[in-house]
Image (tube, rainbow, N blue to C red):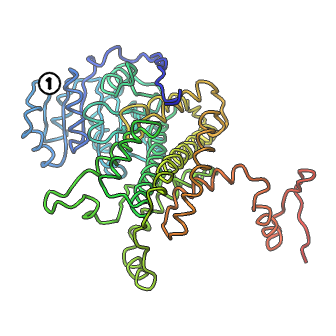
């Protein structure tokens, strides 16, 4: 196993904020008792934190009353917002875990008249970062501190310790201590990053989800090739993913993919993937990440391709019609000799593509820091992602090491170790991807990552002709390479 796979401890960020000394001095209320809210409440109760809970949905409240784990003097459940607020003594800390968008604005409009100056509201849902910036500004007029935190890890993360990306300044000691208490741990270090700037926490969570979309797509295409190009059955595919999870490809999503491939339908006994419809939904965060990359002028093609792949999967009528005249290829009959080189080649190209997707996401952080004056600490973000979140695994720790070595690293692919893995992995996997294309197998994510890497190194690029075309039909001008001067020609 190569040296960069070894875990290296990082220093904790010192706590320099000083509103309230301990979380015990603030009354904590949780609004939103669906799956994430209930699990986060159990997380807090398990760690000795008293919590008052409220949800407008009676079904969510009933789930709490039927769960014996909530039968504790430390937990109180309320059917009305007035009763909920009355239970909490100022200064209050309210945590929102509700659907993003209009529901957040609606609950805030009801809360504002009931709260006091000095109260704190933390939005732990997947709100768009611009909404968080707006809400922080609006509530500051009432003396209420509004903060946004990206909470990653799904229901299990919320229950046992998520990765938390907190944005905004200042932050009460009480809140920071609470989040350190309930977050995941890498060794002894809490997976919590505090990012100055309202909205920065939700922004970082949004990019996390964009990288997550890309990573899921790359893993899905790799499973697709194991089945349709290399010809492994589901137990064989699960064995490959389990093997990969012991090395450089180790991650929560790699392990999850192996577990899926081992699963069978309890009704029919068929492999799980044989009864799952090939249509993937999305909740919008990946699309937001793709949109902000475009707005900031950052090339992040794997995030965009992963969103596009989910949209394409939903084109069921068109896909059905296109299969009639042009049928999809049959399963490849791969020889033992071909399998011997194809599986390691696929591992190499998958690792290279995953590093490339992370590099695209972290480049967005550079542009956001400049645009919004946030000074996002990329090493601290990577450290936060080492445990508790969907992207947890070996790569975030290796990325943290890269920024610890070179804090001003222009691009992750310029890190000597990561860059070498990318170059070697893509070179090892080119023939495999050529085989896939010749067999008419769609692997747009892997190809996109490879083309991104090749384009970064190519000089000159095909964009010379595009620059000329723009000047020819629109007189937009172009830059002369011989003297770095913008000119416009008369092409007639």
Give neighbour class at mark 1: few <14, some 14-19, many 20+ (Cα, 10 Å).
Answer: some
Residue at 34 percent across and 28 percent down: it is 184
Question: Measured along the vertical axis of the image, is residue 187 above or below residue 124?
Answer: above
**Residue, disc 1:** 74
Q: Quadrant of the C terminus?
A: bottom right
Q: Position of residue 128 (x, y in %)?
A: 44, 47
Left or right: 491, with 12 as reference point:
right
Residue at 24 percent across and 24 percent down: it is 27
Q: Position of residue 236 (x, y in %)?
A: 33, 52
Examine the image and state in which quarter residue 325 appears.
bottom left
Question: Measured along the vertical axis of the image, is residue 438 above or below residue 144?
Answer: below
Q: Position of residue 181 (x, y in %)?
A: 31, 22
Q: Is residue 196 visible?
A: no
Q: Position of residue 365 (x, y in %)?
A: 57, 40
Left or right: 247, with 408 as reference point:
left
Q: Is residue 383 visible?
A: yes
Residue at 37 percent across and 55 percent down: it is 283
Q: Secondary structure at mark 1?
A: loop
């Amino acid at each position: 196993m190569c040296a960069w796979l070894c875990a290296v401890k990082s220093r904790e960020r010192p706590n320099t904020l000083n509103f309230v000394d301990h979380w015990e001095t603030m009354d904590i209320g949780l609004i939103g008792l669906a799956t994430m809210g209930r699990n986060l409440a159990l997380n807090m109760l398990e760690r000795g934190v008293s919590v008052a809970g409220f949800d407008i949905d009676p079904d969510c409240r009933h789930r709490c009353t039927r769960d014996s784990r909530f039968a504790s003097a430390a937990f109180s459940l309320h059917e009305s917002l007035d009763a909920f607020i009355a239970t909490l003594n100022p200064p209050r800390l309210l945590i929102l875990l509700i659907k993003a968008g209009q529901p957040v604005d609606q609950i805030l409009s009801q809360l504002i008249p009931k709260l006091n100056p000095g109260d704190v509201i933390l939005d732990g849902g997947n709100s768009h970062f611009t909404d968080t910036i707006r809400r922080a500004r609006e509530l500051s007029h009432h003396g209420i501190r509004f903060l946004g935190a990206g909470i990653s890890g799904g229901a299990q993360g919320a229950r046992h310790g998520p990765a938390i990306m907190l944005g905004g300044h200042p932050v009460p000691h009480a809140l920071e201590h609470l989040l350190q208490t309930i977050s995941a741990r890498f060794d002894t270090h809490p997976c919590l990053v505090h990012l100055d700037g309202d909205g920065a926490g939700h922004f970082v969570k949004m990019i996390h989800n964009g990288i997550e979309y890309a990573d899921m797509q790359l893993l899905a295409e790799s499973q697709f090739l194991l089945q349709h190009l290399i010809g492994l059955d589901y137990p064989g595919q699960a064995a490959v993913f389990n093997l990969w999870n012991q090395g450089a490809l180790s991650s929560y999503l790699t392990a999850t993919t192996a577990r899926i491939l081992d699963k069978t339908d309890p009704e029919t006994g068929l492999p799980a993937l044989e009864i799952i419809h090939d249509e993937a939904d999305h909740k919008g965060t990946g699309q937001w990440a793709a949109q902000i990359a475009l707005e900031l002028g950052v090339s992040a093609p794997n995030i965009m391709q992963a969103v596009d792949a989910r949209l394409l999967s939903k084109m069921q009528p068109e896909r059905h019609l296109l299969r009639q005249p042009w049928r999809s290829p049959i399963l490849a009959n791969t020889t033992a000799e071909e399998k011997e080189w194809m599986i390691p080649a696929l591992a190499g190209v998958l690792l290279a593509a995953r590093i490339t997707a992370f590099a695209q996401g972290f480049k967005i952080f550079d542009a956001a820091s400049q645009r919004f004056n946030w000074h996002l600490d990329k090493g601290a973000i990577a450290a936060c992602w080492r445990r508790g979140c969907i992207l947890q695994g070996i790569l975030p720790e290796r990325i943290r090491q890269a920024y610890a070595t070179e804090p001003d690293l222009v691009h992750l692919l310029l890190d000597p170790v990561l860059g070498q893995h990318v170059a070697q992995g893509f070179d090892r996997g080119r023939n495999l991807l050529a085989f896939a294309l010749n067999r008419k197998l769609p692997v747009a994510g892997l190809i996109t990552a490879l083309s991104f890497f090749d384009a970064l190194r190519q000089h000159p690029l095909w964009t010379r002709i595009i620059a000329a075309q723009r000047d020819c039909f629109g007189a937009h001008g172009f830059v002369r390479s011989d003297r770095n001067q913008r000119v416009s020609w008369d092409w007639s």
